[in-house]
Image: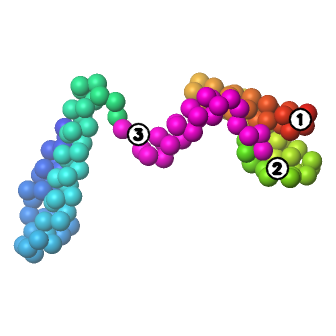
Amino acid sequence: MTWIWIILALLYILSPYDLLPDFIPLRGWIDDLVVLILIVRYVMRLQKAKRGEPQQRPQQENDQHHKEERRHESGAEDPYRVLGISPGAAKEEIQSAYRKLASQYHPDKVAHLGAEFQELAEKRFKEIQHAYEKIRNP
């Protein structure tokens, strides 16, 4: 199926009927160059996958991964940050933040999702419970 897309893209490049007509010098080649670049990137990605090289993560995902590692290395995260409240928050605000997050990440709420989501929700729920206990009983 992937080769079909590559063949269609090459036909688009060679076709005189483009989004930007080819008879306009330089301007007409822009869409062809974009399609060609996308084909090259896709083929390179396929070759990397065949060789077993790991795919690059997007930067945001990579940063999140490092934050998770640092949190686990340094122990627990700040309980106020886990609950998304300021350290000087009132008791009612703490309870409302806890209830909101607990209902959102409760394992029963994600029981219909896949096993990965259930595990992530369970971990997050335990973090929320631990943070709430830490704030309630310093």
- Which of the marked residues, 3 or 1, is nearer the chain's N terminus? 3
On the image, the x and y values in percent for residue 29 come to 13, 65
- Which of the marked residues, 1 or 2, is nearer the chain's N terminus? 2
In the current view of this chain or complex, which residue is farthest to the front? 74
Task: Please tell me which residue lies in front, 68 or 40.
Answer: 68
Q: Quadrant of the N terminus?
A: top left
Q: CA distance from mark 3 to mark 1?
A: 39 Å
* Residue 62 showing in the rendered view: yes
Q: Residues within 10 Å of mark 1 (few under 14, many from 20)?
A: few
Q: Which mark is residue 128?
A: none
- Secondary structure predominantly adopted by residues drawn in magenta: helix
Residue at label 1?
Answer: 138
Disc 2 residue type (three-letter):
Pro
Taking the spot 58% from the left edge, 34% from the top edge, the residue there is 70
116 w.r.t. 35: above or below: above
Residue at label 2?
Answer: 87
27 w.r.t. 108: above or below: below
Q: Which residues are magenta?
A: 56-80
Q: Nearer the viewer, mark 2 or mark 3?
A: 2
Q: Secondary structure at mark 1?
A: loop
- Which of the marked residues, 2 or 3, is nearer the chain's N terminus? 3
Residue at label 3?
Answer: 57
31 w.r.t. 135: above or below: below
Q: Quadrant of the C terminus?
A: top right
Q: CA distance from mark 2 to mark 3?
A: 34 Å
On the image, the x and y values in percent for residue 99 come to 83, 42
Left or right of 109 in this view: 12:
left
Q: Which quadrant of the figure has residue 105?
A: top right
Q: Secondary structure at mark 3?
A: loop
On the image, the x and y values in percent for residue 58 come to 42, 44
